[in-house]
């Protein structure tokens, strides 16, 4: 039944039912396009009209734009952007302008007809203003093929329908705006995340060649762009060379050595020359856009300068397959990223320059040091060899002349012997520290005392301040005693009355800090600066190899050695060495120890250690008093109250020399040979750990 | 008798050179550094006919320097410009030799070729006398 054919109460009933059905169908639609489309179709169908359209007021407020139509022709017009001015020229414009319902019962005859050849033939037209609250947002147009199809009595029900539709449309518009804002906020958050990611990488990746590819990858992957690349200026600032680029296209361009002329016909060239961003939202219209065959799909392009302190270092290119692809947020965050990258590039350049300068300085220093060493070595060798050759020449001349005064000859031979002795001593100084090292836990005080004893330094001059935690270090005791001997001797020769030896745990984990501080004369700066140079010495009869040997030995033990000295304020030597690591021995093999051990040693830390481990078996003496019943007689090589020679003589007299084992902190071939010739059982390195202790009788 | 001032900090070198010079009948005054060499010169300034200085030895502050001998030579030559000075060194280097000669040394003698030292000393003394 046609709506227009129904009259009276029945018409009202049909009208209200139809309005209700229409509103029911559109009530749950929140998408604007779907709402508009569905509403015109439902109204058209339910009211059996020829066409129904919706116009909405545009942003200017001057035009009503056709949004949706139930007819094919109307949709085509909407797609073409059909719009009507809001005035009295059209029924649509008039109903919106006057905010009232306009009806044309005979559309063909009246002046304000919606005239358009595209519409189906029209008998009647009704334009209902779409009013949401106090605002008119557009108009709903009902068209019928029949003339006078709409009656005044229909108005209230249709206006209610239009009002409800207007509210639904306004809600849909608000819903769309909300979604747009939400989407914008999400993208903004994502961009901030991406910018933060690049910022972190800039802070953590020092290598520019690693950083730039990460940046282009982040830009493309996080922003969803087509391509990104980084160009850096060459030395002459004439060309910008591609240094990092995204994807296969990027790889190909990098392989080709892609570069663009500064100021040339490219966005990058213009961006660098002007030190400002260049943005092409439609590359077809951008004069300076560089048509790149590797990137055929680019529709938008942005070039951002990499600038630091007003100086342009290069530029970043970012490309998209969409036109108008870059939002204000994109541009802001990407420029921030580019600024961060510029700082990283500048830092890398600065670091590179510093490294070059440092390398050059180091090279010069190495040459200077080598020259010093060579000079000192030649000077030393010349001075030691000269008396030999000169004296030999003199003896020859004397022999030719018949001058053979025994006293003069004796002095000449003595000159030769002393010079040769110094050369031999230097050989030992050079070769000794280079001998194989066998690091093991050593008791610091014991090795220092042994070094002092070997060098004839009175124990009264030594003061110890050793922390328990630093009492044992890892070292080869023979080599360590050798260099401690050099250092203690230097102190004594500088006139020291007291030598303080301190040991603490170092700041560096696993290391002990040993300080040897004397109250001697100290060194002037130029002597101190050359103190580590081999053959440099200010002392007659010295070879200048002590400190270089100490440096060598400490380095072999993975330690460090430093010297601090000032004239009149003495000298401090700081040595760091690994603290000793004692393997955990659950069952020390001490049960095999001899039942009766005579230990002849000073009352020192090592003797305490030995007695603590084997107390029941040990008789401790500090003098050459031999107990012949002992199974083993252990004798320290360095004794204060007596001498090893005295003890060995006593053992010989008691006929127990074969029970004697001499223990020493540091081997010396000559001394060891001399002791072994006395008939002792053995000469052994002093054990400083339980593991080594059990080795004494195995 | 010709008197030679000999200054070297290496005792064995000093004694050996002294003996070599004594053997050829020179009168030798010895010192082991710049300070003692300068004192020896001041005490015997008029009687010294020639000086032989080591280049690398303790300077006037007692600090060993590679060119301390030149410092001593300059002080002495300032007082006795006619005094022939031979600079001894273990380091065979053209620049150092030229520098020593420019500062007033009569010769620069490299240790290790000492058999020629006596000849050189006699040659220089002979030149000085003929002038």
Image (cartoon, coloured by chain):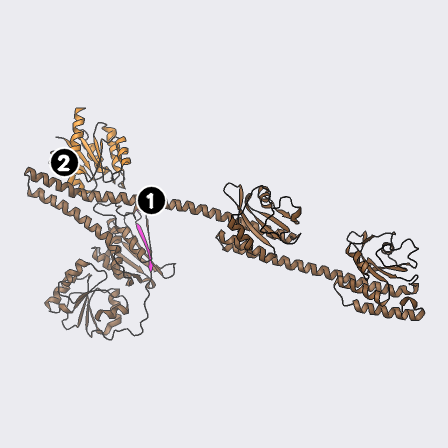
Chain colours: A brown, B orange
Quadrant assignment, res A479: bottom left
Q: CA distance from mark 2 to mark 1?
A: 39 Å
Quadrant assignment, res A8: bottom right
Mark 2 closeness class: few <14, some 14–19, many ≥20 residues within 10 Å = many
Specify the farthest residue to the top: B131
Residue A13 colored magenta? Answer: no
The image position of residue A650, as x and y in percent, is: 12, 66
Q: Which SS does the magenta portion mostly show? A: loop
> Which residue is identified by label 2?
B21
Residue A580 colored magenta? Answer: yes
Give SS at disc 1: helix
Q: In the image shown, does A7 or A449 lie closer to the viewer? A: A7
Q: Is residue A79 left or right of residue B28?
A: right
Q: In the image shown, does A479 or A350 lie closer to the viewer? A: A350
Residue A367 marker: 1
Residue A47 marker: none
Q: Which residues are magenta?
A: A566-587
The image position of residue A657, as x and y in percent, is: 13, 67
Q: In the image shown, does A251 or A525 lie closer to the viewer? A: A251
Give SS at disc 2: helix
Of circles 2 and 1, which is in front? 1
Task: Name which residue lies at 20% across and 75% down.
Answer: A595
């Amino acid at each position: 039944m046609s709506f227009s054919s129904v009259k009276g109460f029945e018409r009202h009933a049909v009208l209200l039912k139809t309005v209700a059905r229409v509103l029911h169908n559109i009530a749950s639609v929140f998408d604007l396009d779907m709402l508009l489309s569905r509403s015109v179709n439902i109204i058209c169908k339910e009211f059996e009209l020829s066409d129904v359209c919706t116009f909405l007021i545009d942003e200017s407020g001057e035009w009503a734009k056709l949004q949706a139509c139930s007819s094919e022709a109307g949709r085509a017009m909407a797609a073409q952007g059909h719009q009507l001015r809001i005035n009295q020229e059209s029924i649509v414009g008039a109903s919106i302008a006057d905010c009232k319902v306009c009806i044309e019962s005979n559309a063909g005859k009246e002046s304000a007809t919606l005239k358009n050849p595209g519409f189906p033939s029209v008998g009647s037209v009704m334009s209902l203003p779409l009013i949401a609250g106090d605002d008119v947002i557009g108009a709903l147009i009902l068209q019928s093929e029949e003339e006078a199809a709409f009656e005044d009595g229909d108005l209230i029900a249709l206006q209610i329908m239009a009002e409800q539709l207007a509210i639904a449309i306004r809600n849909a518009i608000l819903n769309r705006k909300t979604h747009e804002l939400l989407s914008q906020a999400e993208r903004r958050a994502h961009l901030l995340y991406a910018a933060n990611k690049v910022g972190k990488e800039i802070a953590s990746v020092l290598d520019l060649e690693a950083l730039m590819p990460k940046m282009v990858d982040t830009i493309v992957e996080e922003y969803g762009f087509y391509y990104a690349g980084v160009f850096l200026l060459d030395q002459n600032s004439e060309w910008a060379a591609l240094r990092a680029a995204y994807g296969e296209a990027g790889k190909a361009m990098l392989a080709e050595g892609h570069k663009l002329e500064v100021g040339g016909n490219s966005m990058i060239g213009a961006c660098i020359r002007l030190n400002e961003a260049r943005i092409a939202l439609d590359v077809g219209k951008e004069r300076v856009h560089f048509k790149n065959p590797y990137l055929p799909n680019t529709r938008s392009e942005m070039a951002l300068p990499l600038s630091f302190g007003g100086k342009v270092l290069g530029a970043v290119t970012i490309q998209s397959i969409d036109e108008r692809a870059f939002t204000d947020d994109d541009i802001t965050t990407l420029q921030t990223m580019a600024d961060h990258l510029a700082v990283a590039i500048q830092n890398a350049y600065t670091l590179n320059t510093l490294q070059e300068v440092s390398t050059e300085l180091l090279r010069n220093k190495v040459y200077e040091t080598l020259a010093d060493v060579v000079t000192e070595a030649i000077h030393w060798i010349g001075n030691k060899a000269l008396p030999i050759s000169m004296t030999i020449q003199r003896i020859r001349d004397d022999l030719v002349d018949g001058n053979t005064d025994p006293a003069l000859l004796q002095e000449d031979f003595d000159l030769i012997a002393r010079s040769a002795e110094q050369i031999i001593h230097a050989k030992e100084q050079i070769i000794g520290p280079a001998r194989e090292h066998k690091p093991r836990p050593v008791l610091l005080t014991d090795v220092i005392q042994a070094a002092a004893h070997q060098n004839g330094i009175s124990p009264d001059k030594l003061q110890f301040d050793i922390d328990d935690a630093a009492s044992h270090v890892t070292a080869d005791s023979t080599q360590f005693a050798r260099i401690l001997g050099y250092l203690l001797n230097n102190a004594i020769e500088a006139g020291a009355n007291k030598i303080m030896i301190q040991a603490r745990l170092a700041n560096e984990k696993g290391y002990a800090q040993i300080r040897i501080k004397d109250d001697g004369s100290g060194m002037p700066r130029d002597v101190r600066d050359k103190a580590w140079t081999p053959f440099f010495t200010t002392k007659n009869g010295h070879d200048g190899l002590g400190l270089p040997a100490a440096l060598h030995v400490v380095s072999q033990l993975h330690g460090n050695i430093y010297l601090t000295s000032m004239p009149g304020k003495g000298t401090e030597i700081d040595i760091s060495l690994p603290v000793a690591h004692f393997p955990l021995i659950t069952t020390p093999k001490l049960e095999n120890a001899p039942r009766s051990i005579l230990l002849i040693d000073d009352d020192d830390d090592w003797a305490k250690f030995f007695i603590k481990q084997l107390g029941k078996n040990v008789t401790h003496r500090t003098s050459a008093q031999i107990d012949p019943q002992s199974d083993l007689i252990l004798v320290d090589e360095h004794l204060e109250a007596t001498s090893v020679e005295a003890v060995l003589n006593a053992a010989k007299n008691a006929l127990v020399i074969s029970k004697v084992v001499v223990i020493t902190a540091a081997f010396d071939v000559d001394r060891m040979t001399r002791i072994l010739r006395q008939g002792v059982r053995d000469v052994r390195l002093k054990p400083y750990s339980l593991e080594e202790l059990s080795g004494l009788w195995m | 008798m010709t008197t030679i001032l000999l200054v070297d900090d290496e005792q064995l070198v000093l004694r050996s050179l002294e003996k070599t010079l004594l053997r050829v009948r020179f009168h030798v005054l010895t010192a082991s550094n710049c300070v003692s060499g300068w004192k020896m010169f001041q005490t015997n300034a008029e009687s010294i006919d020639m000086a032989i200085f080591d280049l690398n030895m303790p300077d006037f502050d007692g600090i060993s320097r590679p060119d301390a001998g030149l410092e001593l030579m300059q002080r002495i030559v300032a007082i006795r410009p006619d005094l022939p000075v031979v600079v001894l060194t273990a380091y065979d280097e053209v620049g150092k030799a030229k520098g020593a000669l420019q500062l007033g040394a009569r010769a620069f003698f490299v240790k290790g070729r000492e058999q020629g030292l006596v000849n050189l000393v006699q040659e220089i003394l002979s030149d000085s006398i003929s002038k």
